[in-house]
Amino acid sequence: MPAFAANLTLLFTELPLMERFAAAKAAGFEAVEVLFPYDESAQEMRDQLVVNGLTFVLMNTPPPNWTGGDRGFAAVPGAEARFRKDFDRCLRFAEVLKPQQIHVMAGVTDDPAARATFVANLKWACAHAPQRRLTIEPINRIDMPGYWLADFDLAAEILDEVAAPNLALQFDAYHAHRITGDVTGTWARHRHRAAHVQIAGFPGRHEPSGGEIDYPAFFARLDTDGYRGWVSAEYNPKGETAAGLGWLG
């Protein structure tokens, strides 16, 4: 079976964030991710990671205005200065939290210059933080209307164009299902680019069990293909998180 991580932005939300680290450890997780840690003390989070023996696998950029606000700026023409400022703030948090990956969000735009903007910003970010592994993630436009990067083949083209050793694909099986309807086939085409995997059930984006995505088969495929990265549980529990963790066994 793959190595599973808990997304503490969505899991264990019945607890304050600083208590979710211990809850994840007690539930059997060895790693966690926090999408937007910027409203909390980075040092307190680091202390929780250390005391619970957890690996920190992922955080997102940009920091501000997520609730009801922008979904990133990396592909938004005219927002280059804001992207760079936010990326630097992300790096300051990363110095403390030590994430294995930083997800660079493309943002919402239909500007024809979006692709060139995204490529230029990614090239800058990869050169600016060569010690950090960055990821890009196709996100479906049903859950996130207008999100620019909503196609796995386009993501592959972007990765080839940027051609940076520290830039990789973030493969979300839930988004792959909504975008292509074929999680296994999409993984087969793009697995060699993937540095991080995320999962959630469909429909409902709840626990990864039952539903339309055959997760036992997908996990077996990850093992067969030799995937050695983390698989992060990024879903909205139907009830209390611990009660829905039967899939983990």
Image: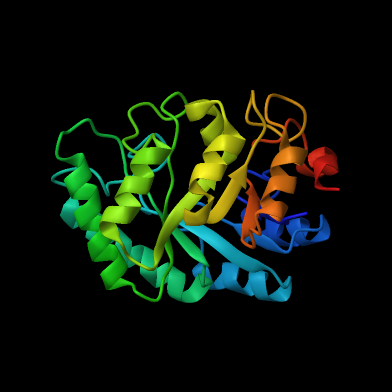
Which of the 4 image quarters holds residue 50?
A: bottom right
Report x, y in % for residue 190: 49, 47
Asked if residue 51 shows in the view, the reply is yes
At a point 15% along the width and 34% down the height, the residue shown is 112
At a point 65% along the width and 70% down the height, the residue shown is 49
- Using residue 121 as the reference point, say whether residue 181 is left or right of it: right
At a point 55% along the width and 55% down the height, the residue shown is 196
Asked if residue 14 shows in the view, the reply is no
- Using residue 37 as the reference point, say whether residue 216 is left or right of it: right
Report x, y in % for residue 21: 69, 60
Q: How many marks?
A: 0
- Using residue 146 as the reference point, say whether residue 22 is left or right of it: right
Which of the 4 image quarters holds residue 208?
A: top right
Tell me how the rendering is colored.
rainbow
Residues 225 and 1: in front is: 225
Residues 215 and 102: in front is: 215
Report x, y in % for residue 26: 82, 59
Is 135 placed above or below 42 here?
A: above
The N terminus sits in image quarter: bottom right
Report x, y in % for residue 248: 81, 47
